[in-house]
Amino acid sequence: MRPHILVVEDEKHLGVGIKYNLEADNYRVTLVEDGPTALRLIDASNEPIHLIVLDLMLPGMSGYTVCETIRDAGVTTPVLMLSARTLAEDRARGFDVGANQYMNKPFELDELLSRVKNLLQHSQASSANASPRRIRESIEQIAFGDVSAHFLNHEVTVGGKSVPMTPKQLKLLRYFVENPDRVISRSELLSEVWEISGNLQTRAVDQTVAQLRKIIEPDSSQPVHLLTIRDAGYRFILGPANAKQEQNVEEETDQ
């Protein structure tokens, strides 16, 4: 079966040109010109989409929003983001919302085709070699410290007061709660929570952990539940007493 590529590009001449050249390389291509149409197609498609070529500057809904929306929905399809923006922070934001590769406009056709081929091969290899997901206890609600969380109802209270949390923050908290007392790498969190390649270079994990600490920790600058294990990842501790022991072990190790 020929790989199916979705191209989201509002510059008609460019979109048609990309479509023509991808089809010449024996790919099946669907071309749309805006984000909402792309999201509806991804949601309703009865056939798999193997790659998304996504323009950043789209009318009404940016490529950032499109990419972040599909990642939050659990879509792991590789995304090649195209943009005329060349600033480092634009590229960083693209990776933070889940893009796999980022290309600046104007670009060479040969490079585009090479990146498309590389992403499709990597995606196929990852799917073929994927190990079964870790079997873990499913927890629907938890209470620790001043925090009470009911994951099915999307309700979190701290000190008896309801606090708002994004779906990603809640999903991350649930993963930590279901995997207590062990070191969890950033790569694992990207794979299991964000459902994207653990090899992706992004600060999304660190940023969301920092946000989570501000919600659940008595003092986010001195966490007692969600600890950073240097050069390894994070460890979630239900009891502050256990967290203190962990900190002591880290300090002794560093000496």
Image: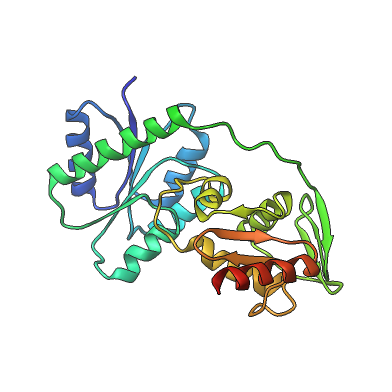
In the depicted structure, whether residue 3 falls above or below residue 240: above
* Residue at the image point whose x is 22% and y is 25% from the top: 26
In this orientation, does residue 100 appear? yes
Quarter of the image for residue 102 reads bottom left
Quarter that holds the C terminus: bottom right
In the depicted structure, whether residue 53 falls above or below residue 124: below
On the image, the x and y values in percent for residue 164 come to 71, 68
* Residue at the image point whose x is 68% and y is 55% from the top: 176
Residue 220 vs residue 141: left or right?
left
Tell which of 161 and 5 is nearer to you.
Answer: 161
Tell which of 183 and 77 is nearer to you.
Answer: 183
On the image, the x and y values in percent for residue 19 come to 23, 37
Quarter of the image for residue 250 reads bottom right
On the image, the x and y values in percent for residue 240 come to 78, 69
**In the displayed image of the protein, which residue is found farthest to the right?**
160
Quarter of the image for residue 238 reads bottom right
* Residue at the image point whose x is 72% and y is 53% from the top: 180
On the image, the x and y values in percent for residue 130 come to 49, 32
In this orientation, does residue 61 appear? no
Quarter that holds the N terminus: top left
Residue 217 vs residue 185: left or right?
right
* Residue at the image point whose x is 12% and y is 49% from the top: 108
